[in-house]
Amino acid sequence: MIIGLGNDLQSIDAIQRLVDSKPSFVERILTPKEQEQLAHRHGIHRIQYIAGRFSAKEAYAKATGYGIGEHAHWQEIEILNDEEGRPRLSVTGDSVIAGANNYLVALSHSNGFVLANVTVENTNA
């Protein structure tokens, strides 16, 4: 059963400007494991990775209805690429939504934008 759907569209240039003006943004938004994956990316792929994770975390917050703040926290929502390169979303702490046991995430980059879609499911229902 689908519990929630969320999507988010971000300008990659806007995220670049944010990273340039506030370098601490990366540490605030990305978990340590995400930062490890980021270290292997260069050029446009680096900012696309940051923008994609930011957008996916926003999409998750929309799917749950929590928003980012009291119940959902940047460091509790993690999107890592698996061995085949697919993004996989996991959640811990207060950011977990009751009944959710499966998270699907899709990311797309095109024409200076990143689009993230997140589906939150309970596969036992």
Image (tube, rainbow, N blue to C red):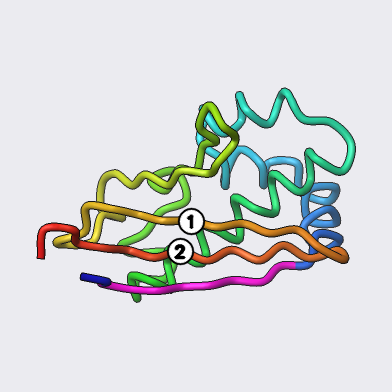
Q: Is residue 6 left or right of residue 3?
A: right
Quadrant where the C terminus sits is: bottom left
Q: Residue at x 51, y 37 (%)?
A: 80
Question: Which residue in the structure is indicated by mark 1?
Answer: 105
Residue 110 or residue 62, whichever sits in front:
110
Residue at the spot x=69%, y=46% of the render? 50
Circles 2 and 1, Cβ within 8 Å, touching? The answer is yes
Residue 99 x %, y %: 14, 61
Q: Amino acid at mark 2?
A: Val
Query: Residue 85 location, x and y as percent?
Result: 60, 35
Q: At numbered mark 1, what does the secondary structure look like: helix, strand or loop?
A: strand
Identity of the residue drawn at 42% across and 48% down: 77
* Rendering quarter of residue 35: top right
Label 2 Cα neighbours within 10 Å, binned few <14 / some 14-19 / many ≥20: many
Mark 2 and mark 1 lie on one chain; the one further toward the N terminus is 1
What range of the chain is rendered magenta?
3-10
Is 2 above or below relative to 24?
Answer: below
Residue found at the far left of this picture: 125
Left or right position of 44 against 53? right
